[in-house]
Image (cartoon, rainbow, N blue to C red):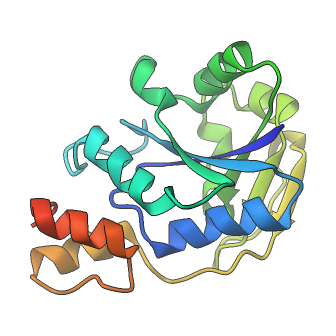
Amino acid sequence: MKIGLYFGSFNPVHIGHCIIASHFAQNTGLDRVWMVVSPQNPFKESGSLLNEYHRLHLVKLATEEETQIKACDIEFHLPRPSYTIDTLTYLKEKHPEHEFSIILGSDGLQNLHKWKNASVLVKEHTLYVYKRPGFEIITPLAARMEVSDAPLLEISSTHIRNMIKQGKSVRYLVPDKVREEIELYHYYS
């Protein structure tokens, strides 16, 4: 089975994340998309992150009715910070029956050379790239890439967190079940 790994903090998961995951699950050669919740991204401060188990739960709520998309907690069981190459090495050992690829935006693609063992990563895995405005598509390190015009929304988790802190509604920005959970437990407020 061909699995696309869509890594993120998902702090919180929002409609834009879900649209991208759905687009790649339905419009490429991928059989499934796993939304890999990163407990600690090596390029981000961890202080502003909601507890990883709460973020994972929100992704599970957002994807629970999907057959091709699922939440993945694999990085919860690996050393921190999480490095994509280590996650993929572990997944290939644990699931040799699957072929794993990486889903990322053209903004992330421009930083790929900074990733741990990036040359090995692109040699062994296909990159599924979605275009982000203002970030040209470059082919780093002779990577195998499939570029897609995924529908994008100008939504960010930072904006959503700020709206919640200001007491504003995030309805239509996050899946309803995610919004209900955020409101119930006063996440980000």
Measured from the top left, where is residue 171 in percent x and y?
Answer: 31, 85
Identify the residue at image location x=42%, y=36%.
Answer: 42
User: In this orientation, which residue lies closer to the viewer: 172 or 145?
Assistant: 172
In the rendered structure, the answer to whether residue 182 lies left or right of residue 105 reads left
In the rendered structure, the answer to whether residue 126 lies left or right of residue 176 reads right
User: How many tags in the picture?
Assistant: 0
Outermost residue toward the top in this view: 93
Identify the residue at image location x=22%, y=42%.
Answer: 51
- Camera sees residue 110: no
- Camera sees residue 159: yes
Measured from the top left, where is residue 41 in percent x and y?
Answer: 42, 39
Measured from the top left, where is residue 28 in percent x and y?
Answer: 86, 61
In the rendered structure, the answer to whether residue 133 lies left or right of residue 37 reads right
User: In this orientation, which residue lies closer to the viewer: 59 or 140?
Assistant: 59
Identify the residue at image location x=73%, y=49%.
Answer: 32
Residue 122 falls in image quadrant: top right
User: In this orientation, which residue lies closer to the viewer: 37 or 122?
Assistant: 37
Q: Quadrant of the C terminus?
A: bottom left
Is 173 above or below relative to 24?
below
Identify the residue at image location x=43%, y=20%.
Answer: 77
Measured from the top left, where is residue 129 in percent x and y?
Answer: 75, 60
Residue 112 falls in image quadrant: top right
User: In this orientation, which residue lies closer to the viewer: 159 or 178?
Assistant: 178
Q: Quadrant of the N terminus?
A: top right
Is 130 above or below relative to 96?
below
